[in-house]
Amino acid sequence: MGTENPEEIVLSGISGSQGICIGKAYLVDREGVDVIERYYLDPQNVKKETNRFKQAVNKAKNELSAIIEDIPEDLRQHAYILETHLLLHKDKMLYGKTIELIENEQINAEWALRKASAAAKAIFRNMSEPYLQARAADIEHVADRILRHLMGTDDVDISGINKRVILVANNLSPAETSQINLDRVMGFITDRGGKTSHTSIIARTLELPAVLGLEQATAVIKSEDLIIVDGNEGIVIVNPAEETLLRYEELSRRYEEHKKEVIRRGDLPATSADSKLFRIMGNIELPEEVVAVKDHGGDGIGLFRTEFLYLSRIDFPGEQELFDQYKEVVELMAPLPVTIRSLDINGDKEISTMPTPEEANPALGLRAIRFCLKRPDIFKTQLRAVLRAAAHGYVRLLLPMISCAEEVTESIRLLDEAAAELDEEGIEYSRDIEIGIMIEIPSAALMADMLADLVDFFSIGTNDLVQYTLAIDRGNRHVAHLYNPLHPAVIRLIRHVVDAGRHKNKKTYMCGEMAADPINLPILLGLGIEELSMAPQSIPEIKNLIRKINVDDAEKLMSTLLAQSSAADLHQIIKDNYGELLFEDIYAE
Ligand code: PEP
Ligand code: MG
């Protein structure tokens, strides 16, 4: 039949979750939602149409509630994603806007919903932070579910799969991903989605290999095709040749062995080969994630992104709600430190119920500390909650997007004002808080010697520092190939920050993605970063590698590294000197 030796095809995507699996593809079809008709209503039918829409929303909500109830125990911590989806069903941007469109434009519910969801998605996509941009996908999943009820098409039933397969889908929603049966599904790949999508967050929790953003997977792969998913490298190999298959079987075996060993040793301290101790911390967005940090041997929370409570709602959260959340995290981690980062959102949020006058460059706009200082009422509510939580454990406050000294002094003034108010009101709090700033704007890096006088520590946010230093939009796929934390300019800035801090006896930490990539580790230790913070799942591996590195040697290599003019040269030198040590366990021949 000519199918004996189908050609081996390699597809490249984004690594959503590490690991390797080999198996038969199972294509998840999902049709019906894309073809939407538009038609106009007779005025007397408008009410009927809004009712039809409301019914579909209720059915979608009931369906999702049932899925939430059935979520297996090990995924419970992610139920919040679906609970947010539940809230989104009645969100003004989606629900209110759709009804408004049906009534005002007298169009059918499907078309109105599509229009409302497109507008809502655009608002999120225009936000500067990838995390917030990725929330556009949440709107889409919710709108899709309602649409299916309007149109009477079926959901993808993943729970019914009865053999061990690799899922191949155009896109998987968090609700679908949460139904994945671990006995049946070895891994999954999708055409869409990216690193910050909730689907990949869940894949990492499930510790299932996943490659996302493949674009062509559902077009190229057929059910029953043999495929290899390499979540470490972000590639998928379709119809592998004999020798590829053998190589990957061996790699997969080694990877599993290695992972077990590394996790087993996760609780041990990260002490380098020459006996220097480093703290390896976890990045979290919600209290539920503290468990993952502890399970993976985290030495504290190096970055608590506090945006989540401010999203998917119209008002701003109150002090008590914030306090309850922060206190929970602080108590769970005590006596280890919890670094609470103050709000890092766009000003858009303030008027999320209305389309906002767009900022031409949101990443350079009214964001983070700039927004907070413009709205001291909102900022102080958060600062009061942080001060109150500090009475229950070890709290650090981290200020994002600092670009000049005035922003720091003004923030500290507001913090003191908040403390004085709490004092007066007789409310328990502690002012014993270490104050740090994110170094993520080149101006702050260059001013580090002066800023060091104002704060207790620096935390380098490489996700933004790379973006602003190299003028590369961190969410723009067209320039993603230029985004490189090993660019000599970035390394020089980091060195300047660490040196300036040391001069004033202030420590420098790092909480951007750069900290979690093994290739960067020798250079970060050599530069003198004292604490690294990352996604919980990366902690054991980084701890494991630190134990093998001699920091003195890494420092000695710095003069050679700093003399290079390109990221590629830096990369090569690290690989030549540390390649075997960093990758010996899995990829060594
Ligand atoms: C960073 O910019 O590196 C960072 C950690 O902050 P965020 O990714 O939340 O912008
Ligand atoms: Mg940042």
Image (tube, rainbow, N blue to C red):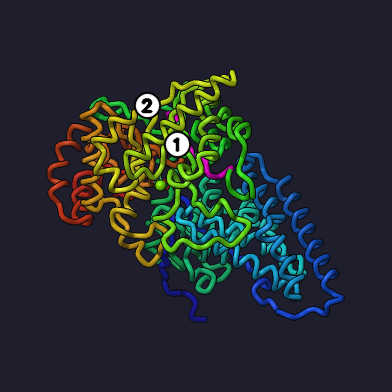
Quadrant of residue 15 in the image? bottom left
In this rendering, the count of numbered labels is 2
Q: State left or right for residue 219 relative to residue 300.
A: right
Residue type of the residue flagged with mark 1: Gly
Image position of 17 with respect to 153: above or below: above
Residue 478 quadrant: bottom left
- Which residue occupies 40% across, 26% down? 434
Say whether mark 2 is within 8 Å of ligand 1.
Answer: no
Question: For residue 475: magenta?
Answer: no
State the residue position of label 1. 282
Compared with residue 131, is residue 428 higher up or lower down, i.e. above or below? above
Q: Secondary structure at mark 1?
A: strand
Q: Which residues are magenta?
A: 296-309
Amino acid type of the residue tagged 2 in the rendering: Pro
- Residue at mark 1 to residue at mark 2: CA–CA distance: 14 Å
**Quick one: label 2, few (<14), some, or many (20+) residues within 10 Å?**
some
| Residue 76 position in % (x across, y down) | 64, 41
Q: Sequence-wise, which precedes: disc 1 or disc 2?
A: 2
Residue 449 placement (x, y as % from top left): 23, 35
Q: Which residue is mark 2?
A: 269
Q: Position of residue 574 (x, y in %)?
A: 22, 47
- Percent across and percent down for residue 503 are 20, 29
Q: Nearer the viewer, residue 566 or 274?
A: 566
